[in-house]
Image (cartoon, helix red, strand yellow):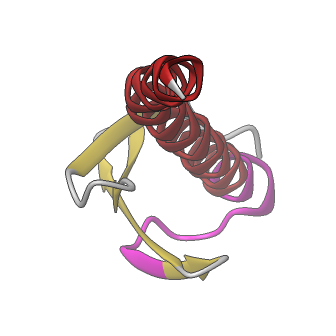
Amino acid sequence: MAEMLVALSTLMMVVSLLLPQTVLIMQERKNIQIRYKAFVLLKREAALYMYENEAKQQKEKVINGNVYYTYWGGNEVCGMWKDVKGKMMEQCFYAGEKMN
């Protein structure tokens, strides 16, 4: 009986230590995926401006349930989105001058 209690308490301690860390790692992986999708979107917007002569404008795009806002500041295209925890994130990408 005592061995069962020791084993159960050890198991509960291991679970209580590992579960929060596992959840945190899963959230950070999701944030990395969201940030990568934002980077790809910014890269695409910069390419459309530089090579396809598309006008600089603010856009809102939904990708996999996440809303991304893109806007221009000089020669940089910037994007804003909310991460898994609801924190507003921002990233910019230098577009350069038009090629055409």
Whether residue 65 is in magenta: the answer is no
Q: Is residue 75 left or right of residue 89?
A: right
Residue 37 location (% of width, % of height): 66, 51
Q: How many marks?
A: 0
Q: Residue at position x 65%, y 40% from top?
A: 36
Q: 29 or 44, which is in the foreground?
A: 29
Residue 21 in view (yes/no): yes
Q: 24 or 88, which is in the foreground?
A: 24
Where residue 97 sits, quadrant-wise, is top right
Residue 29 location (% of width, % of height): 61, 36
Q: 28 or 22, which is in the foreground?
A: 22
Q: Is residue 50 left or right of residue 59?
A: right
Residue 61 location (% of width, % of height): 53, 80
Looking at the rendering, the stretch of residues picked out in magenta corresponds to 47-60
Q: Residue at position x 44%, y 25% from top?
A: 21
Where residue 11 sits, quadrant-wise, is top right
Residue 75 in view (yes/no): no
- Figure check: 69 above or below 16: below
Where residue 64 sits, quadrant-wise, is bottom right
- Figure check: 15 above or below 81: above
Q: Quadrant of the N terminus?
A: top right
Q: Residue at position x 52%, y 70% from top?
A: 55
Q: Is residue 25 left or right of residue 87?
A: right
Whether residue 51 is in magenta: the answer is yes
In the rendered image, the residue lying farthest to the front is 1
Q: 29 or 73, which is in the foreground?
A: 29
Residue 99 location (% of width, % of height): 74, 38
